[in-house]
Amino acid sequence: MNEIVNQHNDLIDLPLRRFNASEIDILQAVCYRCQNEGTREIVIPFEQLRQLSHYQAKDENRFLEDIKETNSKLLQLNFCLGDERKWVQFALFPTFEVDAYKQTLTVEVHKKFAYLLNQLSGNYTSLELRESATLKSSYAKAIYKKLRQFRTTGKWIVTLEDFKEYLDVPASYPNKEITRVVINPSVAELKNYFENLSCKPYYKKNTTGRGRPSVAGYEFTFKKVAADPQDAAEKMAQKAVPRIAEKTGWTPIGKFCPVCHKEIYQKEMHNENGMYFLLGHPDFKTGSCNWTSTDWSSVLTKDQVQEQETPKENTLQMQENKKKLDGLLSGLFGKK
C-alpha cells in the first residue's frame, strides 16, 4: 500500500531545521495518521509507526529517542501566522505521549494548526510516504516536498538565501560545496521519482563587468504531471469568493496576497481603539489560504506578483534584450 499524506502548503513551506532523515519520516507518518481526524487524540501503535515511517533500525531505545527528538525539534520551530510580524511556537501536537510499556504514541493536533492536515480543498501538497522514506538524506527529503508542491508546473525556482534556509544548509558552505554535498546527491536520488530532473544555478547581474557573477539561486526542472482533480474544486471555490465578499462586507482593493498571490479584499473593523481595515480573503476561515493582516506594506501589486512568479533567469534575459533593442533603435533613429 502506498500511503499518501496531504499537507497544507504552510506546513510544506516550513523549514525543518536540524531534523535528521529518520525524524522527518516519523513526522510524516504521524501527520498521515492525523490527517482528517480533527483535533481528537490519535493512538498510534509503535509497530504501525515503524511501518508508516519505514523505520529500519531495530534498537528500540534509538526508536524512542527519535520519536522524542521529532517533537522536541518541532517545538523549537517558529510558525508564521499571516505575516512576518506575528509568530508562534510550533506546538503542532499539544499532546505527544510516548508509552514504552504499551508501545504506543498518543498525539493530538493543536486546534490552531488543525487546518494544516484537515479538510484540505486547495493549496496543499500530496506526499507519498514510501517515496519520501526511500530518500537517504534530509536534503533530498526537503527538496522532494518542494518538487511535489510544484509537480504540475515542473519547475521550482528558489533564491540562494531561501534554499539555504529551507534545507538548513550550513552558512559556511560555499556554492561549490552546496552543489557537491547538497544538490548533486539529492538530484541523483530524486531522479527516480521526477522524470528529466535537473538543477542549474542562475546568477546575479554583473554590474561591474569584472569577474564571474555570483550565484543568485537555483532552478529545478522536471517533467510536469497532470493537475490533481481537487484543483478543479479549488477553482470553483475561488469563483465563489466575490459572492462571499458581497454578503460579508469585504470590498476588493486591487491588491494581491503575499502568500498565495490571489486577490485580496478589505473589511472595515472596529475595536476599543476605533476603526481599522482588515486585509485578507473573504473566505479566510474556510478557504485554502488564511492570510490576514492590517499592514498595507505587506500586500503585492499585480506587477510584483508577476515578477515573483517569473523565473529570475528569464527576467534578467528580458532586461538584457530590452537594452539591446533600445540600443538598436537609438542607432536607427538617433537619440532625441
Image: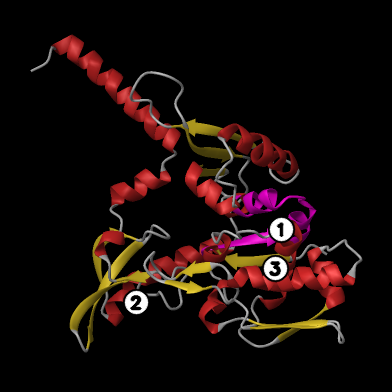
N-term mark: 2 or 1: 1
Q: Position of residue 303 (x, y in %)?
A: 29, 47
Q: Name the residue: 38% across, 60% down.
A: 262
Q: Name the residue: 76% across, 65% down.
A: 3
Q: CA distance from mark 3 to mark 2?
A: 36 Å
Q: Position of residue 88 (x, y in %)?
A: 47, 74
Query: Decide: marks 3, 2 in contact (CB < 8 A)?
Result: no
Nearer the observer: mark 3 or 2; the answer is 3
The kind of residue on which mark 2 rests is Ile
The kind of residue on which mark 3 rests is Leu
**In the image, is residue 70 above or below residue 329?**
below
Q: Name the residue: 29% across, 25% down.
A: 322
State the residue in front, 225 or 218: 218
Report the disc number at residue 20. Answer: 1
Magenta-colored span:
122-146
The quarter of the image holding the N terminus is bottom right
Report the disc number at residue 27. Answer: 3
Nearer the observer: mark 1 or 3; the answer is 1
Q: Name the residue: 38% across, 34% down.
A: 315
Decide whether residue 72 is among the magenta residues: no
Relative side of 232 to 21, left or right: left
Q: Position of residue 243 (x, y in %)?
A: 33, 74
**In the image, is residue 317 above or below residue 43?**
above
Report the disc number at residue 244. Answer: 2
Indicate the secondary structure of the residue bearing disc 3.
helix
Indicate the secondary structure of the residue bearing disc 2.
helix
State the residue in front, 100 or 274: 100
